[in-house]
Amino acid sequence: MLSVTTNLSLMNKSFLTIRKLLNACLLAMFLVACQGEDTADSDNSQAGEVDAELTVSAIDKKNRRGRVTSHMLLGTGSVQGVYFPVGGVICRLLNRHKSLHRIRCSLESTGGSIQNLRDLRAGDFDLVFAQSDWQYHAYNGTSTFREEGPNKNLRAVLALESDPLALIVKDDSNIVDFDGLQDRTVSFGYARSLQHRIINDLILAKGWTDKNFKRIRRMNDSKQVGELCADRVEAILLLSSSLTDYLRDLDEECKLRLVPIEGAEVASIIKQKPYYRVGRIPKGRHLDSKYDTLSFGLGATFVALESTSPKAIYHVVKEIVENFKDFQSLHPSLASLRKKELPYAGISAPLHPGAIRYYREARLMR
């Protein structure tokens, strides 16, 4: 019995010794691998890669060896909306070259602009989509963000698609511009609709009141097209992003056309309220229009915090600009976006240093 016990003891000791040796070998292999990666990082930096001197933020986590693992998390919007698929496009572009810049992109669906901006401030995301007016209010601490106060660390990265107002009349109407709405029965949607609030700024800029119209009928957006076709209103106003939905079941006998919204007053509004921007509804997209229709409105923007890695932001902008045609083709809402608009359109917060660096290299800004 003693012999058996002794043998078991020796076997246990031998097993422990072998396990220690294996652990030591694994540790040595791990350290060599880390040194190799560190050396590769150094070589890449010397070969002219973008600076690896990164700001410590949610995007860059350094382990004990000092190696940087960059993971960029995007806050988008509803899965059924525009921001989520556009975020997927951006991540796809960035991840194609992750072996070069060592930045991995992923995204989450969210509740939209206001929640995105609050979560960004709390450090839950590295980059978020935000409607241009909410970017302005978050930076300045106005409107919904009054209680939180200004977020002066907010930085714009780029402008995305615009969502201009769509002014629609019957094809045989003699209305050719916004001034033609005087003494007409019109609908701008329901009183608190986004397009109603935007057009109120234009009405004020023109020095008009409700009395300049024969009648303003307030109604849900879903009813406007039907009321126009039935000749119960002479013009309606929708957001261009909603036209596909509201024109889908248009009666073939009801011929409609788009009317531009432009002029000195529009330029004045954009100067006073920089979250507005000029937009165009591309020809052929709606109502068989033969020309682009100019208008104005809000737009989507991409924002980060000042502490977000300049290297990461640089590469986000670089991938979009250098693959711009591919970027535009991946979602219909991006088709009318122009490269020169990226640093400016609807942007009211200061640009992120990483974005500025690339825009200057690409000669998109002075």
Image (cartoon, rainbow, N blue to C red):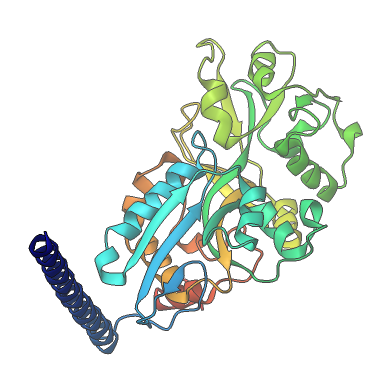
Q: Is residue 101 left or right of residue 107?
A: left
- Could you say where residue 140 lies in the image, as x and y percent from the top left? 76, 64
**Residue at image coords 67%, 49%:** 114
Please indicate, yes or no, whether residue 51 appears anywhere in the rendered image.
yes
Closer to the camera, 59 or 246?
59
- Could you say where residue 141 lies in the image, as x and y percent from the top left? 78, 61
Taking the view exactly as shown, the residue that stands out farthest to the bottom is 46
Please indicate, yes or no, whether residue 363 appears anywhere in the rendered image.
no
Taking the view exactly as shown, the residue that stands out farthest to the front is 1
Classify 293 as above or below 53. Answer: above
Closer to the camera, 349 or 249?
349
Can you tell which quarter of the image residue 71 is in?
Answer: bottom left
Closer to the camera, 121 or 93?
121
**Residue at image coords 77%, 27%:** 190
Closer to the camera, 235 or 174?
235
- Could you say where residue 133 lies in the image, as x and y percent from the top left? 69, 53
**Residue at image coords 56%, 61%:** 303
Q: In this view, does 288 lie to the left or right of 6?
A: right
Classify 158 as above or below 211. Answer: below
Task: Please identify the quadrant where the N terminus is shown.
Answer: bottom left
**Residue at image coords 54%, 43%:** 77
